[in-house]
Image (cartoon, grey):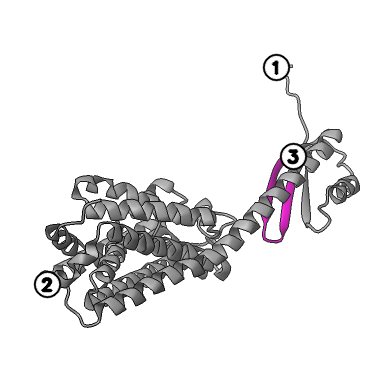
Amino acid sequence: MPAIAGTDVARMKDQLFFEGPDLSRRLSKFWLLLLLAGVIATAGVVADSTATVIGAMIVAPLMVPILGSVVAVVLADRDNLIRSGALVVTGAASVVAIGWLIGLAVDTPIVAATNAQVASRVSPRLIDLIAALATGAVGSVALARDDISDTLPGVAIAISLVPPLAVVGLTLESGAPDQALGALLLFATNVSAILATGLLVMGIYRVHRQSAVHAATPNKELRRSRAVVAIVAGLVVIAIPLAFTSAHVASSTSRESTVSDVATRWATDAGWDVASVATQPDGIVVRVTGPTPTPDTDTLDSELTNAGLDDVTVHVELIPSTAVELTPGD
């Protein structure tokens, strides 16, 4: 792959770096779009509206300083690295604050048990990291090549930055710090993936060869290597809890499937139907409906034990139903 030209590096710097005579205009644009995106994302999560959340992803400019950090590392530009990193941190904190403040105005807690938007963002797994790495690579290539820059809106949708931060604020206000930590882990996963794949793509395009022209700082090679090591180490550290979450989700899914099979056989024998099987923090909830009298749950308990689920807490909700036949006109 050919090395990127100096004019392309200048274009990337103009797109990503917050510097120069128009600094105030660029900062005001960034903060205006980010704060509005935070409100949109939070409102979309509260309303459980996927379309609204996607709109916030497109509006949010948070990927600009993240990619700016990548280019600053490659060019060994210490000042722009600090500036871009500060914008990422303060921008993320601002969106969390927006989520928390809007949560104060909501009557009911916004948590995973009652909101699908929250539930989809509080248990990140290794597959999320893989998706983020691929998406970050696409975004970095689109940055390096202006002929495919029209893919950036898709990148903004595919990699979730602002919505997880809104979930952090909402779940913190709702008294669910464990869920807030999970959403924050998803955000950190996406940021780390963008940084890591961005460095890889910039290395493939040999952007670092332009560092002598576009940045002049002492010991730049040493500083670049330190930053690269820090980013890679961060990615490895983040992968550890993602692996544990993946294993936990896989185990929970397997147990839920087994409970569903056993409960369905038991309910069918009793003339009842399984309405739903769902994993909750305190165990697996099985809801069954049917005519009175209610079936004996001791049989179900024995069958669950025989299936090797004696260490699983299963809550059975029996919902009696009655049928009334109406003959209008008689």
In the rendered view, does 10 fall on the left or right side of 152? Answer: left
Region of the chain picked out in magenta, as a range: 275-286
Q: Nearer the viewer, residue 13 or 177?
A: 13
Q: Earlier in the sequence, mark 2 or mark 3?
A: 2
Q: Nearer the viewer, residue 82 or 226?
A: 226
Q: Nearer the viewer, mark 1 or mark 3?
A: 3
Mark 1: amino acid? Gly
Residue 95 in which image quadrant: bottom left
- What percent of the width, then of the height, locates residue 322? 78, 34
Q: Nearer the viewer, residue 65 or 25?
A: 65
Residue designated by label 2: 20
Query: Is there any visible trace of residue 103 in the rendered image?
Result: no
Alpha-carbon span between mark 2 and mark 3: 65 Å
Q: Quadrant of the C terminus?
A: top right
Residue designated by label 1: 329
- Identity of the residue drawn at 53% across and 51% down: 116
Give the prevailing secondary structure in the magenta stretch: strand
